Image (cartoon, rainbow, N blue to C red):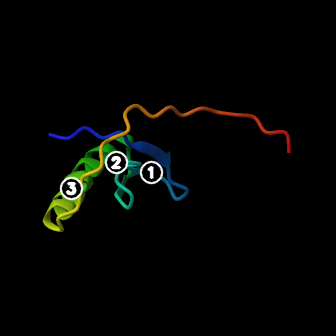
Amino acid sequence: MSTRQVILHLAEEGGYWVEVPSLPGCFSQGETREEALENIKEAIACHLEDMIAAGEDIPADPGEISVETVTVNA
């Protein structure tokens, strides 16, 4: 079992897309938050399987991700 932090984004065309910062190139999408989060689980499993098959090192998850909002005077 692997635990990964993910970032859930609103998609411009509707729905959501999800990325995994600790696994560059691993992303998925869904029409709802729930669907996107379920889909990313499958994407992570496939991504890790591919990395293992290719003999690549599996990067550690950096832990909790903090999302902050800042105001820029521009």
> The C terminus is located in which quarter?
top right
Residue 35 percent across, percent down from the top left: 31, 46
The residue pinned by badge 1 equals 15
Which label belongs to residue 36? 2
Query: Would residue 72 appear left or right of 38 to someone viewing this image?
Result: right
* Disc nearest the viewer among 2 and 1: 2
> The N terminus is located in which quarter?
top left
Q: As displayed, is residue 51 above or below residue 40?
A: below
Q: As displayed, is residue 4 above or below residue 44?
A: above
Badge 3: how crowded within 10 Å, few (<14), some, or many (20+)? some
The residue pinned by badge 3 equals 48
Cβ–Cβ under 8 Å for marks 2 and 1: yes
Query: Would residue 36 appear left or right of 69 to someone viewing this image?
Result: left
Residue 71 percent across, percent down from the top left: 75, 34
Is residue 74 or residue 28 the one in the foreground?
74
- Callout 1: helix, strand or loop? loop
Amino acid residing under circle 3: Leu
- The numbered mark, 2 or 3, whose residue comes first in the sequence reads 2
Gap between marks 3 and 1 measured at Cα:
25 Å
Amino acid residing under circle 1: Gly
Amino acid residing under circle 2: Ala
- Callout 3: helix, strand or loop? helix
